[in-house]
């Protein structure tokens, strides 16, 4: 899309992003996360323009391959494993190596109030203040998968602003915490020293998607236990089918408190990016992710439109009550909603 065809606000945002302006990036992500229709249209205009940009300024939009200069990393793990502490130490190491890192930290949203704590900036004080880092907490908004519905858009905006390492910290770990693996290049799972007990507590689906497992808190009295955990996890991963042709998941021990192992984690991720870029696997992976994203957005958009349709909305209330009372099955109710929607498309004036 030509800049001349963009709305004025979108032109300003695109220019700011290409120049690496943090305020423009923060505003663009806020608009992307908004549920307002006009904000969504503005965001789509910005993203469309960034997708076609060809200049190579400090905030130029990236290609959809690692060769374009960005590495997307998803980080997940059970509560108490020290995700934010690890990301702080890891991020400071990465930016000191000359990279620019953006951290998209998704916090859980309350099912009662809809609000979020959004406290990751206080948990990453050093990284938040660093001139080469950008830390953005975002509400999960009740979405499954440990990520926000607009996390993918936020990643694209961060890349456009010149951040070449994008970290997505998920809400937690569980059966649904695999969505992040569908939108990043490398999926890192953090685990505490614990060996067999930890293996029982982590879902198999998570481990099958892990490109790197990091045993945290590997210092002091926990150092021996961390060493045993590394051996246990390596044995467990050896029984799983690799998800890449040219990469086998590894296990490392790390201490964010002492810095031991942090450099090795980054070196391993750099090797991951190099190996999969040189073989073309990462390009194919991102293309597949883009297709999945289209269908995910289509499903979410259809639900939004169904809920916004006045005729359907009134019918939804009746059907919900019938389902809650047990007089109608959920599948039958869903079918009736879809039939009402199709009837409205066929006979819009009825």
Image (cartoon, grey):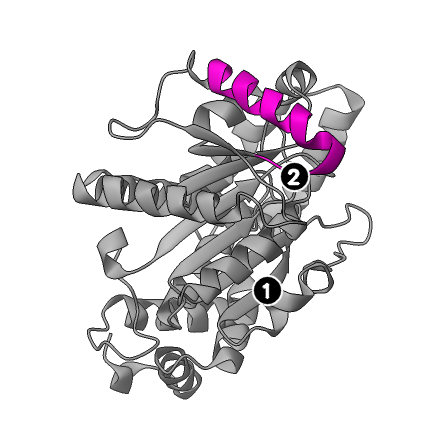
Asked if 178 appears above or below 110 in the picture, the reply is above
Query: Magenta segment: does it hold 311?
Result: no
Give above or below for 176 relative to 204.
Answer: below
Q: Secondary structure at mark 2?
A: loop
Residue bearing mark 2: 172
Q: Out of 301 and 97, give the one closest to the viewer.
A: 97
| Residue at the (76%, 19%) spot, across then down | 326
Depth check, front residue: 159 or 38 = 159
Image quadrant where residue 295 sits: top left
Crowd band around label 2 with a 10 angstrom C-alpha radius: few (<14), some (14–19), many (20+): many
Foreground of the two, 145 or 122: 122
Decide if residue 120 is on the left or right side of residue 276: right
* Residue at x-position 63% and y-position 29%: 174
Most frequent secondary structure within the magenta stretch? helix
Q: Indicate the quadrant containing the N terminus: top left, top right, bottom left or bottom right.
A: bottom left
Label 1 vs 2, first from the N-terminus = 1
- Is residue 225 magenta-colored? yes
Q: Regarding mark 1 in the picture, which secondary structure is present there?
A: strand
Front one among 299 and 16: 16
Q: Which residue is mark 1?
A: 136
Q: Residue at x 64, y 45 (%)?
A: 83
Q: Position of residue 153 (x, y in %)?
A: 44, 59
Q: CA distance from mark 1 to mark 2?
A: 17 Å
The stretch of residues the image draws in magenta is: 215-236
Question: Dot 1: within a 10 Å radius of its alpha carbon, few (fewer than 14), some, or many (20 or more) residues?
Answer: some
Residue 62, position in %: x, y? 29, 64
Residue 105 seen in the figure: yes
């Amino acid at each position: 899309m030509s800049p001349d065809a963009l709305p004025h606000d979108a032109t300003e945002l695109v220019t700011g992003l290409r120049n690496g302006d943090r305020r423009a990036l923060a505003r663009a992500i806020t608009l992307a996360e908004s549920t307002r229709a006009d904000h969504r249209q503005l965001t789509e205009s910005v993203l469309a323009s960034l997708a076609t940009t060809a200049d190579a300024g400090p905030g130029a939009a990236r290609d959809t391959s690692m060769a374009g200069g960005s590495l997307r990393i998803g980080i997940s793990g059970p509560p108490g494993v020290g995700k934010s502490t690890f990301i702080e130490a890891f991020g400071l190491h990465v930016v000191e190596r000359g990279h620019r890192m953006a951290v998209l930290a998704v916090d859980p949203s309350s099912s009662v109030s809809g609000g979020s704590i959004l406290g990751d900036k206080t948990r990453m004080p050093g990284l938040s203040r660093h001139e080469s880092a950008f830390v953005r907490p975002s509400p999960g908004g009740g979405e499954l998968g440990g990520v926000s519905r607009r996390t993918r858009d936020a990643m694209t905006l961060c890349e456009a602003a010149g951040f070449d390492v994008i970290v997505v910290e998920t809400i937690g770990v569980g059966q649904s915490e695999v969505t992040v693996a569908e939108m990043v290049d490398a999926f890192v799972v953090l685990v505490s020293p614990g060996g067999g007990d930890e293996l029982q507590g982590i879902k198999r689906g998570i481990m099958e998607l892990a490109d790197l497992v990091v045993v945290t808190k590997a210092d002091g009295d926990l150092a021996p236990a961390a060493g045993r955990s590394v051996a246990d996890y390596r044995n467990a991963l050896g029984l799983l089918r690799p998800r890449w042709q040219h990469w086998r998941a590894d296990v490392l021990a790390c201490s964010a408190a002492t810095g031991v192992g942090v450099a090795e984690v980054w070196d391993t991720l750099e090797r991951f990016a190099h190996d999969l870029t040189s073989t073309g696997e990462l390009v194919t992976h991102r293309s597949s992710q883009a297709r999945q994203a289209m269908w995910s957005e289509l499903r979410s958009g259809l639900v939004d439109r169904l809920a916004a349709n006045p005729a359907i909305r009134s019918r939804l209330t009746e059907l919900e009550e019938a389902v809650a009372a047990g007089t109608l099955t959920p599948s039958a109710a869903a079918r009736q909603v879809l039939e009402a929607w199709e009837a409205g498309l066929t006979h819009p004036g009825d």
